[in-house]
């Protein structure tokens, strides 16, 4: 798993849980992170924060169309109403089982 996060708190929290990631604060940072995904073959699941998905919907939509990695949107501090489910639940919804 890997995380593209729009805020440092979510990134730090998931790093503490053993999930590495990248803080995305601009379109250029997102482009660089997506390019790094093309080089990495060990990322099976990409977690993307809701805020990031809303800021760059076209890029995230293109990532979701790829066969790999599986892209799953997760809540961040800007979307506290979504924090009732676990990351496992979001991945299960993305996979469809």
Image (cartoon, grey):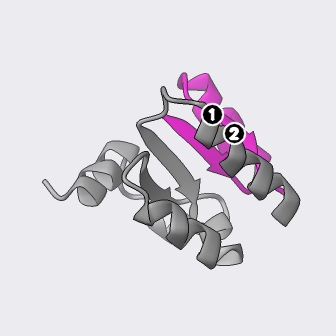
Is 22 inside the magenta-drawn segment?
yes
Q: Is residue 57 left or right of residue 25?
A: left
Identify the mark at residue 39; answer none if there is no mark: 1
Q: Are marks 2 and 1 in contact (CB under 8 Å)?
A: yes
Residue for point 26% across, 59% down = 93
In the picture, residue 72 is in which quadrant?
bottom left
Residue at the left extreme of this rendering: 97
Label 2, label 1: how far apart the Cα atoms are: 5 Å
Image position of 37 with respect to 51: above or below: above
Can the viewer see residue 9 in this picture?
Answer: no
Is 17 inside the magenta-drawn segment?
yes
Seen from the viewer's position, the closer of residues 13 and 31 is 31
Can the viewer see residue 5 in this picture?
Answer: yes
Residue 78: x and y in percent read 67, 67
Residue for point 61% across, 24% down = 16
Span shown in magenta: 1-25
């Amino acid at each position: 798993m890997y995380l593209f996060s729009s805020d440092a708190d979510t990134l730090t929290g998931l790093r503490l849980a053993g999930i590495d990631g990248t803080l995305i604060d601009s379109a250029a940072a997102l482009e660089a992170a997506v390019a790094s995904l093309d080089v990495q073959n060990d990322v099976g699941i990409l977690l993307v924060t809701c805020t990031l998905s809303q800021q760059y919907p076209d890029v995230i939509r293109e990532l979701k169309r790829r066969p790999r990695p599986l892209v799953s949107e997760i809540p961040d501090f800007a979307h506290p109403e979504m924090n009732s489910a676990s990351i496992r639940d979001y991945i299960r919804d993305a996979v469809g089982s």
